[in-house]
Image: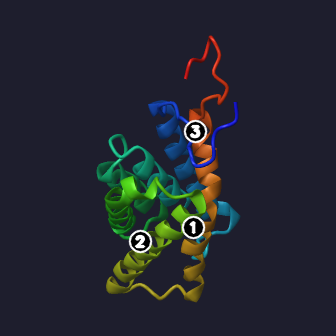
C-alpha cells in the first residue's frame, strides 16, 4: 500500500545502542577529520554537533544538554582547545534544539535544515567569541562555511539516522502496523 500524500511514515523506537553508536562514530569521524584529513581547517563541518542536534531533536528524553556537555569536553580535550569551549557551544546548541524540537518535526527535511542553520551559526559564533576572549587569533572568514555545510548535510544525516527506524509500509500478518 502506498502511503497517502501528507502523512508521515510510522517509525519504530530508536535503539539506545544505535543512538550512542552514532554519537561515538560521529565523534570518531570528527577526530579523524581534525587529525589527518584536513587538519584543523575552520571550514570543516562539525559532524558531532550535527548528529548531536539530530538526536536532541528526535530523542530529547534520551539525549540532552548533559550529554552535549560531556561530548563537548571530550572534543575540547582532543583538540587541546580551551576546556569548555566546545562544551559551551554544544550545550547551547542542544538547549536551542530542545526548544524547537516539537515544532521542527512538522516540517520537511529541507525546511528543517533551514531552521537549524541559525543554531549552527550561533554555536560557531559562541565558540569564536570564547576563543577571541581568551587571546586566540581570528581564524578567518572561511569559518562561515562550516555552519552552511552542516545545514547542507542535515538531509543526509536525517536519512541515514532514520533508516533503522522505518517500518515497512505494507502491513501483513507478520507486521500489523
Percent across and percent down for residue 40 are 58, 71
Q: Say which label, 1 or 3, has the lower sequence index.
A: 3
**Circle nearer the N terminus (1, 2):** 2
Q: Residue at x 35, y 46 (%)?
A: 60
The residue carrying pointer 2 sits among few (fewer than 14), some (14 to 19) or many (20 or more) residues within 10 Å by Cα, namely: many
Element under label 2? helix
Q: Which residue is mark 1?
A: 151
Discs 1/2, front = 1
Q: Which residue is mark 2?
A: 123
Screen quadrant of the N terminus: top right
Q: Earlier in the sequence, mark 3 or mark 2?
A: 3
Q: Which residue is mark 3?
A: 9
Residue at 36% x, 82% y is 129
Foreground of the two, 24 or 98? 98
Q: Are marks 1 and 3 in contact (CB under 8 Å)?
A: no
Instruction: Work out whether residue 45 can be spotted.
Output: no
Amino acid at each position: 500500500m502506498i502511503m497517502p500524500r501528507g502523512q508521515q511514515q510510522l517509525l519504530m523506537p530508536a535503539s539506545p545502542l544505535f543512538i550512542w553508536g552514532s554519537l561515538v562514530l560521529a565523534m570518531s569521524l570528527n577526530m579523524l577529520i581534525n587529525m589527518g584529513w584536513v587538519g584543523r581547517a575552520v571550514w570543516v563541518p562539525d559532524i558531532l554537533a550535527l548528529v548531536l542536534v539530530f538526536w536532541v531533536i528526535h530523542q530529547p528524553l534520551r539525549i540532552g544538554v548533559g550529554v552535549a556537555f560531556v561530548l563537548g569536553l571530550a572534543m575540547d580535550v582532543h583538540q587541546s582547545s580551551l576546556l569548555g569551549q566546545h562544551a559551551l557551544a554544544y550545550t547551547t546548541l542542544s538547549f536551542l534544539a530542545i526548544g524547537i524540537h516539537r515544532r521542527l518535526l512538522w516540517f520537511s527535511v529541507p525546511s528543517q535544515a533551514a531552521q537549524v542553520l541559525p543554531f549552527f551559526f550561533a554555536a560557531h559564533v559562541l565558540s569564536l567569541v570564547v576563543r577571541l576572549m581568551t587571546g586566540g587569533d581570528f581564524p578567518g572568514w572561511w569559518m562561515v562555511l562550516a555552519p552552511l555545510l552542516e545545514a547542507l548535510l542535515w538531509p543526509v544525516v536525517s536519512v541515514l539516522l532514520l533508516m533503522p527506524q522505518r517500518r515497512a509500509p505494507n502491513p501483513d500478518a507478520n507486521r500489523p502496523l
